[in-house]
Image (cartoon, helix red, strand yellow):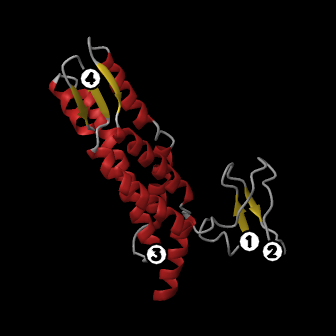
Amino acid sequence: MLSMSNERDLISCSTCGLLLRRDPLARQPGLCPRCGKKLAFRRKNAIQMTWALIIAAAICYIPANILPMMIRTTITYAKGDTIMDGIIAFYMEGSWHLALIILIASIIIPMAKLIALIYLLLSVQLCLPGNDLDRTRLYRLIEFVGQWSMLDVFVIAIAVTLLQLQPFLVTRPGPGLVFFSAVVILTMLAANTFDPRLLWDAKRKRENKHG
């Protein structure tokens, strides 16, 4: 249905999903009669904006994992811990379940979102062969995970809180937390700016090229 929406003069509300027939004489689609959201035929500059956000997120991903996420200070020393340092520390202390949660939420999921969005963009721009229905499902999965994106930051906050319970230990956020939060926000925005209808446009181009 998404692939044929333009040809059938249909437009879908991005907020409530209401499918409307567009007025061919109207230059702007107006507002959704059900939720009042401003309608748009297509997301403007979706590819360029998504690429810009992904590149920025990828740049921030490096210092987010290299710089200290938290700085522990005791009476005798001060030490900065990266995300991986925290994962190893929790694992060595026997809290392997917490180490696994931090590994998945803080390293695997952000990287997987970046790779998936890059794959979708290349599928559109290069008209790569493949199952566009599966690609659409992949995008919906990225959107779903994006709803829980701030969970990554909360996991780090919980880890800091647990460390604070140790006597004579003061923990404060490190510079890595700023970059990590930037990665979370930028990937979430990138998923919102990408237009999945471009996948079906690419499919139509492939069919016209080989047809």
Q: Quadrant of residue 27?
A: bottom right
| Callout 2 amino acid | Pro
Eye-nearest disc, 1 or 3: 3
**Pointers 4 and 3 in contact (C-beta within 8 Å):** no
Q: Report the residue that reaches farthest toward the right.
A: 25
Circle 1: element type = loop
- Residue 24 badge: 2
Eye-nearest disc, 1 or 2: 2
Q: Report the residue that reaches farthest toward the front.
A: 76
Q: Earlier in the sequence, mark 1 or mark 3?
A: 1
Does residue 10 sit above or below 163 in this rendering? below
| Callout 3 amino acid | Gln
- Using the numbered discs, state the Cα–Cα distance from disc 1 to disc 2 in whole angstroms: 7 Å
Residue under numbered circle 4: 73
Give the class, few, some or many, for how many residues have Cα within 10 Å of label 4's Cα (few <14, many ≥20): some
Residue under numbered circle 1: 9
Q: Residue at x 40, y 52 (%)?
A: 113
Q: Earlier in the sequence, mark 4 or mark 1?
A: 1
Q: Residue at x 22, y 23 (%)?
A: 95
